[in-house]
Image (cartoon, rainbow, N blue to C red):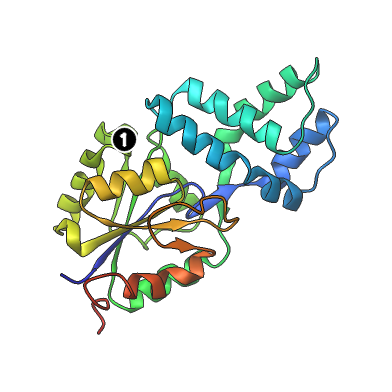
Amino acid sequence: MRIRVVFFDAGNTLVEPDWGTVAEILGRHGLSRTGREVRSMAARAWPLLDRALEARGGSTESAPVKRLLTGLLLDAVGFPPGAVRGPAEEELGRELPGLWRVPLPGVFEVLGELRAAGYRLGVVSNSNGTIERGLHACGFGGFFETIVDSAVVGAEKPDPVIFRIALRRMTAAPDEAVHVGDLPSVDVAGARAAGLAALLLDPFGVFPDCPVPRLAELAEAPRAIRGLPGGPGPAS
C-alpha cells in the first residue's frame, strides 16, 4: 500500500531546545559557549542517551532519565567536574523541560509541502501531557490531524501501542504510515514494532548504523517518503 500518513516525533524532530538560553545557563556557572556551539556539541549526547534507553528501558519521561540527559548534555558541552557542577546541573535540569520551544529550521515548509502533496500528518510523542499545547504555542496549530501524547494515552514509545492508537485515530493501516523521529531505540524501534516504516532525522550523523533511511535535514523528508517501498505518495 502507498504511504498516506506521516507521523512525527516532537523533540529534536519538530522542535529543539532554545540553545541560546542553555548557553546563558552555562555561562552563569562559568562555562562560556554560544548557542550554536552548544547545539553542535550537544549532539554527542544523543547516541549515549539512546544506548542508555535501549539498555535500561523505562519511561523516557521519568526523573532518572531526565537527570541522565542533563548530565550527558553537560558532559557533551565540556562542563568540568567539581563543586560548581551540582548547581549547574540543578538549574539546567529544572529549566530544560520548558526550553523545547524552537521550531527546527525549515519545518513549516516541510509540513506545508507534505500537506500540499496530500499526506495526512500527525504527531506521536513521549511527553508529559503538554505537547499539544506546546506545539500550538510554537506555531504548529492546524498542521496535524492528531497529536498523541504518551502521558495522555498511557503508552510510550517504543511500545507499539502508542502507534496503534495513532493509526486508529487516522483510520490508517500500518503499511500506509511512516514515522519520522530522532532516536533509534525509541522512534525507529517503536514504529517498526507496530509495522510502520521509519525515517531517522540525524543531522549530525551520530547514528551511522541505524537500519532505516537517515535524513541530514528535515527538508529531505518529502523525497525520502516518496522513495519508501509502496511507491510515491497520495498525490501521484
Dot 1: what SS?
loop
Q: Is residue 229 left or right of residue 201?
A: left
To which quarter of the image does residue 144 belong? bottom left
Residue that sits furthest to the bottom in the current view: 236
Q: Residue at x 18, y 61 (%)?
A: 175
- What is the crowding at mark 1: few (fewer than 14 residues within 10 Å), some, or many (at least 20)? many
To which quarter of the image does residue 29 belong? top right
Q: Is residue 35 left or right of residue 124?
A: right
Vertical order, 6 against 89 (above or below): below
Q: Is residue 203 left or right of residue 14?
A: right
Of 85 and 202, the residue lying toward us: 202
Residue that sits furthest to the top in the current view: 83
Vertical order, 176 against 74 (above or below): below
The image shows residue 174 at horizontal and vertical percentages of 18, 56
Q: Which residue is mark 1?
A: 156
Q: Residue at x 56, y 26 (%)?
A: 68
Of 232 and 150, the residue lying toward us: 232
* Mark count: 1
For the question of whether residue 116 can be seen, the reply is: yes
The image shows residue 122 at horizontal and vertical percentages of 31, 56
Q: Residue at x 52, y 52 (%)?
A: 15
The image shows residue 60 at horizontal and vertical percentages of 42, 31
Vertical order, 99 against 82 (above or below): below
Amino acid carrying label 1: it is Glu
For the question of whether residue 60 can be seen, the reply is: no
Which quarter of the rendered picture does the C terminus lie within? bottom left
Which quarter of the rendered picture does the N terminus lie within? bottom left
Q: Residue at x 21, y 47 (%)?
A: 194
Vertical order, 153 against 214 (above or below): above
